[in-house]
Image (tube, rainbow, N blue to C red):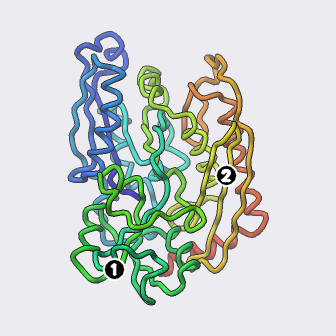
Amino acid sequence: MVLSTKLIATGYTAHQWEKSCMCSLFRALLSASLQLARIQTDSVVEVLRELYPDLRFEIVAMSTIGDKILDTALSKIGEKSLFTKELENALERNEVDLVVHSLKDLPTSLPPGFTIGAVCKRENPLDAVVFHPKNCGKTLGLLPEKSVIGTSSLRRAAQLKKKFPQLEFRDIRGNLNTRLKKLDEKEDFSAIILAAAGLKRMGWENRIGQLLSPEDCLYAVGQGALAVEVRAKDQEILNMVSALHDADTVLCCIAERAFMKRLEGGCSVPVAVNTMLKDGQLYLTGAVYSLDGSDSLKETMQTSVNYPQQNEDGPNDDVQHVGITAKNVPAQAQEAAENLGVELASLLLSKGAKHILSVARQLNDAR
């Protein structure tokens, strides 16, 4: 999980924004001292500035409890709300108007009164291997036996333990800068696994020594996408940020989040996905794993999402799909994507996924 991706923007009330946009100020609040958070915040604000040149945006810093807990594995922290609660409190108090997160950091059920008002175009969702300088030019398969790989993700570790049983996997925490420093300046790790999207946003693509294909490692639900969280009933702000929606990303992420929600998964269990949208067909691959990867279930399903946009103003215009409000994406397509995720999860549950995840959760709690 990328921890450094929280942004908040704040300013006048919705009424003031509508009537006085020439003097409106939107203040962007991000996790303190986190470079990736700033880069991601800037990318969203830059688009909003282009779309709404009469609005002003100011960026300030804030830390969350989750950002401060750097000595505990993410799977042991458990609650994703540790990375969002303070930000949502500010949103609820009308101190801010929008919050930007990495979508994979957001739970599949948001607190009442909040919604994801925009899902931006997805970056590369794949995982990437960054090697210690002494291992440059190698791949995971070419590392010496017993080489130590750093990852804070149970999902990554479970899949890679099965594929590379000769390697050892250990937790590594901290933001991207910290983890890369631990890799480069010490001999503790031969390589670490990170999200390719974060590395690209930081301008560190040259550090990627190996991209892990879906055959090697399915990725996390929502990985690579940024989400803009707003107050669910704030129509002016909802309308403003809805222009940021990328329809293909919305549909893929609705399916992924519905899959996760039906499984009751999270950071404390290994759940993984891969989605593809092609010729109006949405393909979803989903899998669950034991902690060591020795037991797993993996299936793929597809559905048509080729529906026209209709005039959907009215009592159903605020319908959420796993926490996402996307009025500019066809409602039938969103429903089909959500149903796809639910049906795939139900298929895995019928084959024993609940037992696999229950055992994984118990073993993780006992570690």
Q: As displayed, is residue 235 above or below residue 212? A: above
* Viewport quadrant of the N terminus: bottom left
Residue identifier under label 1: 189
Nearest to the observer: residue 330 or residue 211: 211
x, y percent for residue 104:
47, 52
Question: What label does residue 166 carry, if any?
Answer: none
> Can you tell which quarter of the image residue 175 is in?
bottom left
Q: Amino acid at mark 1?
A: Phe
Pointer 2 local density, CA inside 10 Å: few below 14, some 14–19, many at least 20: many
Q: Which element is circle 1 on?
A: loop
Q: Residue at x 24, y 80 (%)?
A: 186
Instruction: Decide if residue 362 is on the left or right side of residue 349.
Output: left
The residue at the far bottom in this view is 145
Question: 213 left or right of 132?
Answer: right
Q: CA distance from mark 2 to mark 1?
A: 33 Å
- Determine which residue is flagged by label 2: 284
| Residue 148: % across, % down | 39, 82
Q: Nearer the viewer, residue 343 or 197?
A: 197
Task: Give amino acid for label 2.
Answer: Leu
Q: Residues within 10 Å of mark 1 (few under 14, many from 20)?
A: many
> Who's the residue at 69% across and 24% down the image?
308
Compared with residue 54, is residue 90 higher up or lower down, i.e. above or below? below
Task: Count how many numbered circles sit on residues in the image.
Answer: 2
Q: Position of residue 244 (x, y in %)?
A: 44, 30
Tell me the quarter of the picture where residue 69 sits.
bottom left
Q: Which residue sits at x=36%, y=52%?
A: 200
- On the image, the x and y values in percent for residue 247 come to 56, 34
Depth check: give the residue in front, 229 or 118.
Answer: 118
Residue displayed at 38% across by 71% down:
192
Label 2 element class: strand
